[in-house]
Structures are given as C-alpha cells and as structure tokens.
Image (cartoon, grey):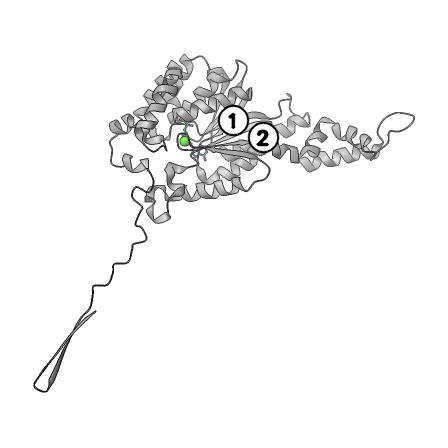
Amino acid sequence: MYIICWRRKKTLFVIFFLPRPKQRKRKTQGCAGSLNLNWNNLRGMDNEKKRSASFSKGLLQSGELYQYVLETNVYPREPELLKELRDMTATHPRAIMATAPDAGQLIAMLLKLTNAKRTIEVGVFTGYSLLLTAFTIPEDGKIVAIDMNREAYEIGLPVIRKAGVENKIEFIESEALPVLDQLLEDIRMKYFKILPGNENGFDFAFIDADKINYWKYHERLMKLVKVGGIVVYDNTLWAGSVAMPEECTPEILREGRERTLEFNKLLAADPLVEISLAPLGDGITIVCTELFIQSLNHFKHVCGGSLFNYCISQGIMKLNKESQRPPFSFKCLVLGFRLLLV
Ligand code: SAH
Ligand code: CA
C-alpha cells in the first residue's frame, strides 16, 4: 500500500494506493493436462476420427506409445476374424465400449493359464471379448454370455459363426443380476442332485457392463467361480478419471468415476481375494478367488464329504464300532452344514 500526503493551506490531502488483491488460485487449476485424459481427445470427434484414434483406450503417456504396443505386440498376433470384428465395431457409434485389444491379449493369456473351460461374460456388445474367449477355450468349453441388448451382438454374430465357435456360446439377453442369481440357484440344485449334471462352478469370468452393479456381480461371482478361478473387471481406471479431482472430471464421466472409485476401494479392502489392477486398455482388475476359497475351506469341503474325514482325523467324531459308519448325529450335522450353504 502506498500513501501520498500533502498539505495545502490548512487542508491535509491523503491518497492511498492499494495494490490489486492477488487472485486466489482457482481450485480447478491444474486440471488440464494433469492426466492424459484421452476422453477429452475424443469429445467432439466424429466417428471416423474416433475410429482412427484407437489410442483413445490407452492410459499411457502418449498415443504413439500405445500405438507402438498395439502394432508390435497385439495386432500381429490377433486372429484375423477378431480383427474383422474389431473393424466392424469401429463404425458403431458406441465403438469406444469394445474391449481394448491389449487388454484382450492379457485376458486370453489368463484364460490359457487357468485352463478355463466354463466362463461367464457380462457385457457382450458386438462380441470382441466374447469371440476372443471362444477362440481361447477348448472345443468343449462353454461361455454364458449375458447382455441386456442383443442388437449389438447381432452385428458380431456373422463373424462368430464364420469362426465356427457359436456352439461354445450361450447368449442370454437379460439384465445380468437375475441371470447370475439363477446360475447360483442351478449350481445349488445340481449339488443336491435335483438337476442333472455335476458342473459346479466356472473357471473364469469377464465383467464389462454397468459399473453401478460391479460389487453385486462380485459377490455372486465369488460363489460362482471355482477355487483358483479368475474374474476380470474392465474399465477400472475409467478413462483415467479415478485419479482426477471431481471438479476436473468431465460431466459425462462423473457417475462412472464415482462407481469405479467405490468398487476399487471395496475390492482393495477385501482380504479374501488377490487382486492386480493392470493399466491396459481402460484398466482391468484381475481378481483371483483362491484366498476366498481358502477361508471357506471347511465349508467347501463339506460338499465333497471331507468334513467326515476331517472330524475323524481331529477326533471330533468316532465311527460306530460295529458298523464302521458315522453315527446318525453326524449325518444330521452334515445336512445342517449343507443347508447353511444354501
Ligand atoms: N465386452 C464387450 C463390451 C461390453 S460394453 C466387448 O468386448 O465388446 C457393455 C455392455 O454391457 C453393453 O452391450 C450393454 O448393453 C451391457 N450392459 C449394460 N448394463 C447391463 C446390465 N445391467 N445387464 C446386462 N448387460 C448390461
Ligand atoms: Ca469395457
């Protein structure tokens, strides 16, 4: 502040010069460029440009780097028909939803590593990840593929037929939650021998649908997927917005960002699973069910009759001397456990 004073005759003149108040830093400063948010690159682009901007799915520092990964490692190994499906999908107004090919490559590897035969797919769209899975699982493998909208699936279907893998796919047009509940019910029924068949469980699941239900899907999948099985969740970095302040996040991403943040937090706090968030595509979280099953080991083994052996070995129960059979009370105990499992 400056003050200038002077006196003229009997009057004192004073002038104050106040400096301009410093502009407060806006909270949103630093939004732009704080993340290589590829969504921004896409807004306003026409479909043609979106198609060519396939780097838009990558979360790497530069589009060129992502392009390098795709061109050197992914595209040369991508089956011809999968590429055809990808190209067909590229003209779809919602092409951005299709699974990124680099994420797909890791999914295929996980399917192979786990020898997956029976899988679940939630969110089919035109079928990129579905065809990839169908190519990877064995001839007698099965995929339960769920999507509430068959229209997009119809686009990819001719390619799936051409690939000769339609027989591995059971497409169900429905909201996913009731189907997962029904699958659980079927497994229980098979366990009690009410329905024929003894397949109890899936080896693998890929979840790529509405983020709002991810945790509900997770709860069901932990019961549907067998010991050592794998569940992969797509879009767990939500275009990079999970690391942005809310006010910097484009409106269109905000709800998904909230849901994804919630889901990632819950998953990270779950001591019963092993997780790894791989920054491929739009982020995929790989969840291994092993620890979950270990913690439920006793319950699991009830189904296989191992509770009996366990009780004998631990001295909890003795066999009837004459008949060498477990006493009636033990059978009631097993039945009780089984009912608890339902
Ligand atoms: N995995 C696909 C992309 C899936 S896009 C691919 O590789 O191309 C998401 C899909 O989830 C959409 O087709 C949408 O119809 C479906 N979807 C969204 N909410 C759903 C719900 N509640 N139940 C079932 N499907 C749903
Ligand atoms: Ca996706």
Pointer 2: what residue?
224
Closer to the camera in the image, 30 or 313: 30
List the single residue furthest toward the right: 322
Residues at marks 1 and 2, CA–CA distance in whole angstroms: 9 Å
Question: Is 23 left or right of 273, judged from the image as shown?
Answer: left
Sequence-wise first label, 1 or 2: 1
The residue drawn where x is 55% and y is 32% is 221
Q: Quadrant of ligand 1?
A: top left
Task: Using the image, determine if residue 328 lies above or below residue 104.
Answer: below
Q: Is mark 2 within 8 Å of ligand 1?
A: no
Measured from the top left, where is residue 83 in percent x and y? 36, 18
> Residue 126: in sight, yes or no?
no
Mark 1 residue type: Ile
The amino acid type found where label 2 is placed reads: Leu
Q: Are the residues flagged by discs 1 and 2 in contact, CB closer than 8 Å?
A: yes
Residue placed under numbered mark 1 in the picture: 120
Using the image, determine if residue 336 lies above or below residue 305.
below
- Of residues 215 and 229, the one nearer the viewer is 229
Task: Give the SS element for disc 2.
Answer: helix
The disc at residue 37 is: none
Residue placed furthest toward the left: 9
- Name the spot of residue 130 as percent of width and height, x first: 45, 22
Classed neighbour count for the residue bearing mark 1: other residues with Cα under 10 Å, few (<14), some (14–19), many (≥20): many
In-image side of 162 versus 286 (left or right): left
Q: Quadrant of the C terminus?
A: top right
- Quarter of the image with the N terminus is bottom left
Viewer can see residue 47: yes
Residue at point 74% right, 27% down?
305
